[in-house]
Amino acid sequence: MKTSRFLTIPLLIVFSLAPAWAEKKPAIPLATVSFVVVRDENGKPVRNAAVVLHPVQENGKQERGGIELKTDPDGKAGYDGVPYGKMRIQVLASGFQTFGNDYEIGRPTIDITIKLKRPAGQYSIYEEHPSDKKDQKPQ
């Protein structure tokens, strides 16, 4: 008799809470995002570029996780099921500067074209620069 009461009470609690657990959450709207990655100097496609999508919180911090895509020979990549909101898009490709920018996803379909630049020369204090010559005063 004790055992049946011991099992009856938890079962009643579980069955009374089951409808609350079964309620569906509101559907999160999802978008289809398409990317085209091209060279800045001539507009030719960049193949095998890594396109990384990271969700961004309200405070601007990047959330954990994300999605990584690779571009095809035409420089194209796409993903269905990107949740609405701010996304940080990063593009990495060998021989190019890393690209990064935040985009607001708020429509069912979005097309994004990214132009990658070649690396620029680094500034060195050991080299002479045209701006250094005009700053010097004759002695």
Image (cartoon, grey):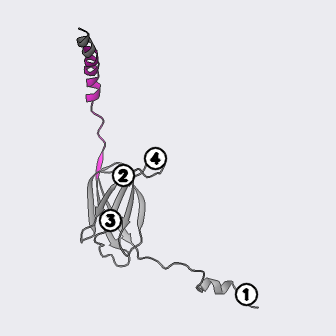
First reached walking from the N terminus: tag 4 or tag 1: 4
In the rendered image, residue 115, in percent from the top left (x then y), is placed at 37, 70
Residue 64 x %, y %: 39, 50
The C terminus sits in image quarter: bottom right
Q: Is mark 4 on a helix, strand or loop?
A: loop
Q: Distance between the residues labelled 3 and 2?
A: 15 Å
What label sits on residue 137 in the rendered view? 1
Q: Which of the 4 image quadrants contains residue 94?
A: bottom left
Q: For the residue carrying disc 4, how many other residues have a C-alpha within 10 Å: few (<14), some (14-19), or many (20+)?
A: few
Q: Is residue 128 above or below residue 62?
A: below
Quick check: marks 1 and 2 in contact, CB under 8 Å?
Answer: no
> Residue farthest to the top?
1
Taking the spot 51% from the left edge, 78% from the top edge, the residue there is 122
Question: Which of the two labelled residues, at mark 3 and mark 4, occupies the earlier sequence position?
Answer: 3
As for residue 19 lying within the magenta part, the answer is yes
Q: Residue at x 26, y 24 (%)?
A: 19
Q: Circle 4 is placed at which residue position?
A: 58
Q: Residue flagged by tag 2: what amino acid is it?
A: Gly
Q: Nearer the viewer, mark 1 or mark 3?
A: 3
Q: Give the range drawn in magenta.
A: 8-31
Q: What element carries label 3?
A: strand
Q: N-terminal of the two: label 1 or label 3?
A: 3
Q: Earlier in the sequence, mark 4 or mark 2?
A: 4
From mark 3 to mark 4, how far is it between C-alphas?
Answer: 25 Å
Secondary element under disc 1, as helix, strand or loop, is loop
Residue 65: assigned label? 2
The quarter of the picture where the N terminus appears is top left
The three-letter code of the residue at mark 1 reads Lys
Q: Nearer the viewer, mark 1 or mark 2?
A: 2
Residue at image location 34% in from the left, 66% down from the top: 113
